[in-house]
Amino acid sequence: MVERDSRTTPRAGFRAIFTSVSVQLFLWLLGVMLAAFAIFAYVNIRTTSEQWTQSLYQAVNNTSELIKRATHYGMLLNRKEDVHQIIRMVAKGTGVVAVRVYDKSGAIIFSAAPEEIGKRVDMQAEACVICHDRAQPLAAVPAENRVRVYRDPLGRKLLGLINPIRNEPQCANASCHAHPPKQTILGVLDVTMSMAYADQRLALTKRQMIVAALLMALITGAASALFIYRVVRVPVKRLIRGTRRIAEGDLDSRIDLRVQNEIGQLAEAFNTMTANLSKARKELNEWSQRLEEKVVAKTEELARAERQIVHMEKMASLGKLAATVAHELNNPLSGILTYAKLIERDLGQSALEIERKDELRRYLGLIQKESSRCGDVVRNLLLFARPTGGDFALQHLNQIVERSLMLIRHHLEIASIQLDFHPLEGDDQIVCDANQVQQALVALLVNAVEAMSGGGVLTVEGRCFPSSVEIEISDTGVGIPEEIIPRVFEPFFSTKEDQNGVGLGLAVVYGIVQRHGGSIDVRSQVGRGTTFRIWLPRKPRQVHANGRETRETASQAGNQERGGSSI
């Protein structure tokens, strides 16, 4: 696997290089520049070559005309030696290869090379065929056909120019060698020059132009590469790195491109997009967190509601059982108490010994005491199990709380407990059975005092809501273990170590609160105290024996209003 990667990595690297936008743009611009400079060099070289050729043609033509004018006077006077001397002197000039004068028949009458004089030229030669290869020779040679470029047997490149010598009036009237006036051409002056020097200069010029074109292409290419690198490659690389960071989830990343072109606008739009994405992700995370919190809260609320329903069903079953047992026990207990009183009355009329009477009276007293105690238990069971009943009327809750506190004030003083009372502020009126509410409050206050046997602080605080009121009773006592909190409202369940309590106090409180359509909950920490919170509606709904749904609905409405939970 590693060897395969090492083989494929260079190829992938080259592919990445040639697929880069900046490299492709540079190569395209370089190709265009090379093509443009190549065309420019070609056109320039061609133009220069033509200009050099035209200059050379003009130089040859000027030389030919100079020879004609220099020899004109000598020819008129038929001074052949002077003409020969002039031709030989001109032939010594730089680049002049040959100078000849032909007569009309093609014989060489003057030449820079004496051995050529008298020879005849082939009339089918390149210089002659232009005019003489016709049925009627031309009277004048066209200017474009007077120049010829050829190579001699030695391989030298030569430029020849034929210049016709016309029969001017001076020649026709000369006494030395008069020519007929009808003869237009007397002969031809043929000047041949070497093109070696011109070709060397032209080749040098071509090389210089090619080198200049290459240097210009190189400089322009380097400048273009630098421009593309700074304007295209660097910003694009930053965009790519920024895109990859964002693709990896870093939405707080920003692309720092301080340029005022399209790439800068793209980077700015990119930063705006990432900022919006980051904001959207934060909002989404917040919504997700809120949703989780709401789900947890709703789950806890449903769990509390389920526990409340189970607890209420359990309490309802216990209430039915308690009512049945109370009714079954009430009549026998009443009979026992009645007969005990009758026996005690008849005992005073009997003839038994005094000691025996005292002993029987003690037994009867115990029977009466325990029967009365059982009667209280039965009454409390009936009060807990009774779903309806009570003298409901519009009452001021603050007055009920104050009367309840008056009943336990002596206990507070004995136990050295400090009272912190905060009455309800605002409208404290509710529809309730004042005696039952007072009974429930007194039971909770007594429990709080008993939990603070060594002293402490008892806090009673009232709160008003639009459709309900709330009473919170807190102590700084021993607290209730968490595992037994769900059982504190069950009948006959008690945490007191003495045998006087039968465990019906909180059960009775629960029954009274439920009878008023409210709810009660408890929060406690061992060693730090306990808090009971009672919620009561201002106008309790009608509650029937099988109307648990009515109580649940009212209790849940109160929980939503005060933002709490209940047992």
Image (cartoon, helix red, strand yellow):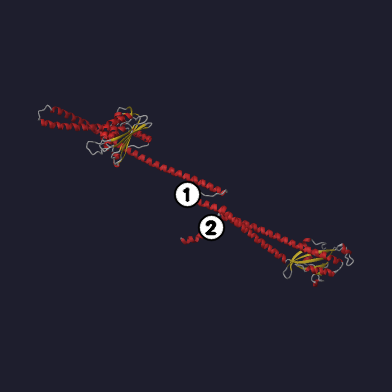
Instruction: Give the residue displayed 49% in from the left and 51% down from the top.
Output: 244
Residue 432 vs 485, above or below: the answer is above
Q: Is residue 486 visible?
A: yes
> Residue 449's image quarter?
top left
List x then y, in percent, for residue 52. Answer: 72, 62
Q: Which residue is at the far right?
A: 175
Residue 456 vs 350, above or below: the answer is below
Disc 1 target residue: 250
Q: Residues within 10 Å of mark 2 (few under 14, many from 20)?
A: few
Element type at mark 1: loop
Q: Residues within 10 Å of mark 1 (few under 14, many from 20)?
A: some
Disc 2 target residue: 15
Please give left or right for residue 384 compared with residue 558 in the image. Answer: left
For the residues bearing labels 2 and 1, Cβ distance under 8 angstroms: no
Q: Is residue 389 visible?
A: no
Please give left or right for residue 182 compared with residue 493 in the image. Answer: right
List x then y, in percent, for residue 336. Answer: 18, 31
List x then y, in percent, for residue 312. Answer: 31, 36
Question: Alpha carbon of mark 2 to alpha carbon of mark 1: how far?
Answer: 29 Å
List x then y, in percent, for residue 443. Answer: 28, 33
Q: Amino acid at mark 2?
A: Arg
Q: Amino acid at mark 1?
A: Asp
